[in-house]
Amino acid sequence: MGDRRRVWDGSGALLLAIVGAVTPAGAVTPECRTAPLPDTALTAIGARGELAFASGTRGVLDGLRWPETPDLAEAAAAWLETHRGVPLTLVARGETDRWGRVHVDALAADGTVDLAGGLIEAGLAVVDAGERDSLCRPGLLALEAAARGAGRGLWREGASSPGEHAAEDGVALRARLGRFVVARGRVLWVGERARRTYLDFARRGGDGLTVTVSKRTWRQLQDRGLSAATLRGRLVRVRGIVEIWRGPTLDVASADMIEVLDSQVSKREVSKREVSDATQAQGR
């Protein structure tokens, strides 16, 4: 299993969260391997969430996406400002990214504050594995779920950056071209191809989301017990950057960015869909 650390949930309670992503064999994935950094304190916050620390370390918080809209970005920066000067324990995750930034976990030395967890639980950031194959801290998804359920921050009704989109609403998704979204819907068709697998959330001719999954990521999903048959009809949440290819598309690089939200569908339900799925497949 991955490392276990105390994570602040934003409401005065502490919970245990698994902060190291694991492979099916139990080994920590390379991008999630940890390395200690000198204890330090936050000294500056960049416009896009880049952080500077008194030790000289510069980086970003691992496992989240900095908010895109100015009001939420300001709120996130203001939340971090309240922790400026607090003694922090930093842990580096994997290698530096292509911008030369260190991905870090940053927790108060006394265990009362987790910067990434606090932002997500307050609804000021969303969980995102970024360009990495794994989400190193899957426990962050539970904090995001709490914020979503309470309607905090970007999850509140009428927020300028709506937190979750309907996967079948192609019009709304097209309007988010080039931006990060979280979408939710039922998988109506799964198409396995040599290099990619396609998850469709709209029937043929409809205007809805298609998720493309690389061969490598599809193998990871299969290792977790998912397949074309077991995903059809399932309610899922996906996240990524919106692109347009025939319709709105998300290219998901991490299996952790596909969350199955409902229970296993029955074999009868799967078989009833196979005829319509085959009909759709003829058009591809």
Image: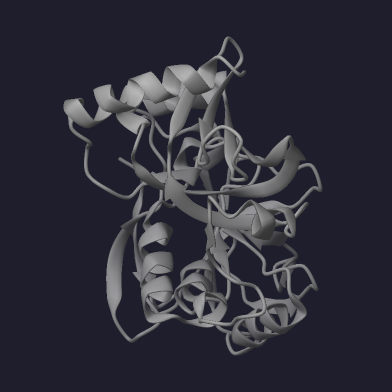
Location of the N terminus by quadrant is: top left
- Where residue 104 sits: x, y (%)? 59, 57
Q: Please say if 236 is above or below 165.
A: above
Q: Note whether residue 90 is visible.
A: no
Give the residue displayed 67% in from the left and 66% down from the top: 66
Q: Please say if 278 is above or below 124.
A: above
Give the residue displayed 62% in from the left and 76% down from the top: 41
Q: Please say if 204 is above or below 155.
A: above
- Where residue 233 sits: x, y (%)? 34, 37
Location of the C terminus by quadrant is: top right
User: Is 185 left, or right, of 25 in this rendering?
Assistant: right
Colour mode of the rendering: one colour
- Where residue 101 sits: x, y (%)? 74, 52
Frontmost residue, 246 versus 184 = 246
Q: How many marks?
A: 0
User: Is 77 left, or right, of 115 in this rendering?
Assistant: right
Give the residue displayed 46% in from the left and 26% down from the top: 190
Frontmost residue, 234 versus 79 = 234
Q: For residue 274, what is the image quadrant?
A: top left
Give the residue displayed 59% in from the left and 90% down from the top: 82
User: Is 179 left, or right, of 185 in this rendering?
Assistant: right
- Where residue 130 sits: x, y (%)? 63, 47
Q: Note whether residue 68 is visible.
A: yes
